[in-house]
């Protein structure tokens, strides 16, 4: 019964999305207000049907209705209710339904916000969105149908993927990732509408930029949560492994970041329209590529869903979406001609151009490194993997150059600055760079790339801070009180500017934290009997015993350690080794003592409960916590910029 | 119309579709073993329980199913009865050998007492044999023909049907 109801809702959603997409395109061509009204109705109907289907699935999960196929795959009477609720996105079919639900929210929300505006563009935009919605409804109705029925009905199910139950970050990471990925459909629709219209007016820039910024914020947070999860769960002490699926989340983020910057130049100077639209379309296409990477079973990754039959369907959609973008761009890019021109390279817009080229170069570098093993195997049958050395060698110089621009760009004036203006703007912040590099050197930094990062980082921090608080300072010079200046200058009028610089501040901190944490880490392996201690940095780590815990879905061996520093008790850490029914190798779950200056990370390599011996990997890494903190800054800054007034 | 954008775009689309379409059906976890088609690396290990030394070369003339496993490995628990049953069914036609690594003799003996043993289990206590065979995880099974040549390698727990298919391959 539940399965039939769900299937019916999905089929209705497919019908509504298909019809709405056709109505949208037709209304775009004919320009009738009635056509737009109907397209809007279809958009709301799609969102409502997807929301209902999702509610039906959640109800089936919570009521343990094992006659529904998806519930029989991921449901279990043994797991707590919150696990049951999040099982919606724990497996392939449910996660695609969740995708459809979020897509519905985005489409209906954006349609509602712009219901009386941008009437030239909106029909096409709704047409494109509902076209994408039709594809996902088709996926849910056919190849990834979670509402199939099972007979005979099982009494209980296996519960969701064990890794999902392992850590709270796995509960919040996927929704943020979907909000980021799915949200890229909206700017794609806007950009395509501009191309189909053959025009991109300044008034349309605001919804385009806002629709890009929102998923960008979610994606930023999602990438960080993914890194944090890897750090807390996977046990090798790092947060980024250049795994294909991690790269898949980074690729659209890179192009979207580039697009957010080129949109500013477009707004200021009326140039780079075709380029910005291309970047926006690329961001969407890269999310679909990323979905393909995670769902097709073609890539080797810890994050992949198991091999599935939906890969070919997604590949067809990817091909259609690329072709659509190529054709709209090919036919219309020249109609988005420039209204202004770039004055000189040594100006703020000049650095924006270099910034864009670097982001695109970075995107290609990561993309090629990710698909290169597939290319090699396709060409000569040899298996290989592209790992850290390639990515580090390529990404570190480009990242450093971007950090340099993060300082120099905002320091330079717009337009055609005089050379003494340029000198004055660029020289002062050097103090910040030199001071930070000197502090780093004094604290023992020897790696040349890290020192350069500190130099550029200090420079960028100086520029960011002075630009961020400039409106406040100016108002206070004019006699405003601090309170008035803060509210009027930063939070009311200059919100977008203020938000952007908060994002920059976060970016400076994250780049420095990554550079320092990846080059200054120390690790030590020790084999300890109960009562024995080992030293790492200022910490004394004592093994106090091991025990075995049996749980229904796994067996765990837990080792307990007492951590002291300079004779004082610091904390107890209990890393563990988990053996799951479905996995060939045990998974270590580390335990971390985290402080603002650095982390102590313990991970078990082997442990014997019988003889009470443990092999432990101890790692100290400075500044890791700052990575997570800076991403909060970036998210908040993005939010402040998003809710700015025109 | 911008021809350059169109041509480059269509070429990119074609390349991506061709590349990914080619990659379908490929198991990314699977790594081709360079040992397949070669003579099995030699080892002589002590059997758990009897203490007898088993030399792989002494088994020439008979196909061998060489299974790497460990008592801490849960998929190995699922695979164990299948291997036992197959070994009994095939009798003297095929020699089954288990090699355990990353484990202790007491653990293995307790395991065998509880679940039975139909063929010799050897202890690779220094892990050298597992390294020589390039074992990446347990269970992993090598199928060796009469002449000592490795015919196939399987990663993960075998089902009875899979095992039959591979055994047929070494027997032919």
Image: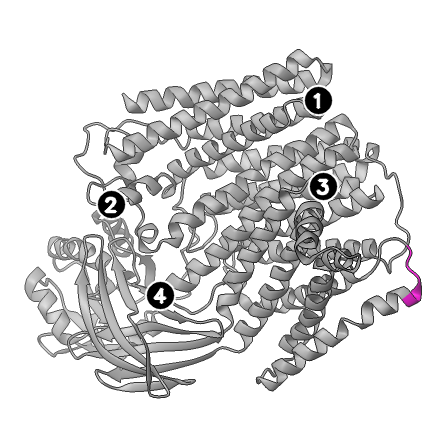
Dot 3, crowdedness within 10 Å: few (<14), some or many (≥20)?
many
How far is mark 4 from mark 2, CA to CA? 35 Å
Instruction: Tell me, yes or no, whether the highlighted magenta stretch contains residue A418.
Output: yes
Callout 4: SS: loop
Q: Tell me if label 1 and label 3 are in contact, CB under 8 Å.
A: no
- For discs 3 and 4, the disc positioned in front in the rendered view: 3
Q: x, y percentage for residue A236? A: 41, 69
Q: Name the residue tied to disc 1.
A: A119
Q: The C terminus of chain A appears in which quarter of the rendering?
A: top right
SS label for mark 2: loop
- Do we see residue A218 in this rendering? yes
- A284 left or right, relative to A304: right
Q: Which residues are magenta?
A: A416-420
> Viewer-proximal residue, A206 or A133?
A206
Report the side of A193 relative to A75 (left or right): right
Disc 2 and disc 1 on one polypeptide chain: yes
Question: The numbered mark 3 sits on a residue in which chain?
Answer: A
Q: What residue does disc 3 label?
A: A278
Q: Which residue is mark 2?
A: A80
Q: Gap between marks 4 and 1, in whole Å?
A: 60 Å
Residue at the image position 76 percent from the left and 71 percent from the top? A429
Total of numbered circles in the picture? Answer: 4
The answer to which image quadrant residue B47 occupies is: bottom left
Work out whether mark 2 precedes mark 3 in sequence or the reverse, and give the earlier one.
Answer: 2
Q: Percent x, y for residue A62?
A: 27, 35
Mark 4 = which residue?
A: B136
- CA separation in Å, label 2 and label 3: 46 Å
* Marked residue chain, label 2: A
Marks 3/4 in contact by CB < 8 Å: the verdict is: no
Q: Position of residue A439 (x, y in %)?
A: 63, 81
Q: Quadrant of the N terminus of chain A?
A: top left
């Amino acid at each position: 019964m539940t399965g039939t109801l769900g299937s019916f809702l999905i089929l209705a959603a497919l019908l509504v999305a298909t019809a709405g997409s056709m109505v949208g395109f037709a209304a775009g061509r004919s320009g009738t207000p009635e056509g737009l009204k109907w397209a809007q109705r279809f958009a709301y109907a799609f969102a409502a049907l997807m929301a209902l289907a999702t509610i039906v699935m959640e109800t089936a999960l919570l009521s343990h209705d094992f006659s529904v196929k998806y519930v029989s795959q991921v449901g279990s009477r043994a797991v707590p209710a919150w696990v049951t609720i999040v099982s919606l996105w724990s497996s392939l079919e449910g996660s695609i339904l969740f995708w459809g639900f979020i897509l519905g929210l985005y489409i209906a929300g954006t349609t509602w916000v712009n219901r009386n505006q941008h009437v030239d563009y909106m029909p096409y935009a709704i047409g494109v969105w509902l076209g994408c919605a039709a594809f996902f409804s088709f996926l849910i109705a056919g190849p990834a149908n979670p509402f199939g029925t099972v007979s005979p009905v099982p009494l209980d199910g296996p519960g969701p993927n064990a890794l999902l139950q392992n850590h709270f970050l796995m509960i919040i990471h996927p929704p943020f990732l979907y909000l980021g990925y799915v949200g890229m459909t909206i700017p794609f629709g806007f950009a395509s509408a501009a191309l189909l219209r053959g025009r991109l007016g300044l008034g349309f820039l605001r919804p385009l930029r806002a629709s890009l910024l929102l998923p960008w914020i979610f994606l930023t947070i999602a990438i960080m949560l993914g890194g944090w999860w890897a750090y807390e769960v996977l046990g090798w002490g790092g947060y980024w492994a250049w795994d294909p699926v991690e790269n898949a989340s980074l690729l659209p983020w890179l192009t979207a970041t580039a697009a957010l910057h080129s949109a500013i130049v477009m707004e200021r100077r009326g140039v780079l329209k075709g380029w910005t639209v291309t970047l926006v379309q690329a961001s969407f296409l890269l999310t679909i590529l990323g979905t393909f990477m995670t769902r097709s079973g073609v890539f080797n990754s810890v994050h992949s869903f198991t091999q599935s039959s939906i890969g070919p369907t997604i590949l067809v959609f990817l091909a259609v979406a690329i072709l659509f973008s190529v054709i709209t761009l090919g036919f219309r890019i020249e109609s988005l001609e420039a209204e202004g021109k770039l004055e000189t390279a040594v100006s703020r817009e000049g650095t924006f151009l270099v910034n864009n080229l670097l982001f695109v170069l970075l995107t290609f570098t990561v993309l090629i490194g990710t698909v290169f093993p597939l290319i090699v195997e396709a060409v000569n049958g040899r298996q290989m993997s592209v790992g850290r050395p390639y990515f580090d060698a390529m990404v570190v110089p480009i990242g450093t150059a971007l950090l340099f621009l993060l300082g120099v760009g905002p320091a330079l004036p717009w337009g055609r600055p005089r050379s003494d203006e340029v000198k004055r703007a660029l020289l002062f912040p050097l103090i910040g760079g030199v001071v930070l590099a000197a502090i780093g050197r004094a604290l023992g930094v020897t790696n040349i790339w890290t020192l350069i990062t500190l130099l550029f980082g200090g420079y960028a921090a100086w520029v960011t801070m002075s630009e961020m608080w400039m409106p406040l300072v100016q108002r206070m010079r004019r006699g405003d009180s601090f309170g008035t200046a803060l509210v009027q200058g930063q939070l009311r009028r200059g919100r977008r500017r203020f938000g952007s610089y908060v994002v920059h501040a976060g970016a400076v901190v994250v780049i420095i934290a990554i550079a320092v944490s990846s080059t200054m880490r120390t690790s030590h392996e020790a084999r300890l009997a109960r009562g024995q201690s080992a030293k790492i940095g200022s910490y004394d780590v004592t093994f106090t015993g091991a025990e075995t815990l049996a749980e229904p879905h796994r067996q765990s061996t837990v080792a307990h350690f007492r951590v002291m520093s300079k004779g004082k008790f610091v904390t107890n850490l209990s890393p563990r080794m988990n053996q799951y029914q479905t996995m060939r190798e045990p998974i270590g779950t580390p335990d971390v003592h985290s402080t603002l200056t650095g982390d102590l990370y313990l991970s078990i390599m082997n442990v014997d409960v019988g003889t009470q011996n443990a092999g432990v990997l101890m790692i100290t890494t400075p500044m890791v916590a700052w990575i997570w903190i800076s991403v909060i800054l970036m998210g908040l800054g993005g939010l402040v910029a998003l809710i700015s007034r025109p | 119309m911008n021809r350059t954008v169109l041509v480059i775009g269509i070429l990119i689309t074609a390349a991506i579709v061709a590349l990914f379409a080619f990659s379908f059906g490929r198991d990314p976890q699977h790594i081709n073993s360079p040992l397949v088609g070669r003579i099995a690396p030699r080892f002589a290990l002590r059997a758990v329980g009897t203490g007898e030394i088993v030399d792989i070369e002494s088994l020439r003339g008979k196909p061998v199913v060489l299974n790497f496993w460990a008592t801490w490995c849960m998929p190995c628990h699922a695979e164990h009865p299948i291997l036992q049953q197959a070994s009994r069914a095939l009798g003297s036609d095929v020699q089954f050998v288990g090699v355990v690594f990353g484990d202790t003799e007491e653990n293995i003996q307790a395991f065998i007492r509880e679940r039975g043993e139909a063929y010799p289990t050897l202890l690779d206590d220094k892990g050298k044999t597992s390294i020589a065979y390039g074992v990446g995880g347990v269970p992993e099974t090598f199928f060796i023909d009469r002449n000592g040549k490795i015919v196939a390698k399987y990663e993960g727990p075998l089902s009875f049907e899979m095992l039959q298919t591979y055994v047929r391959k070494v027997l032919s």
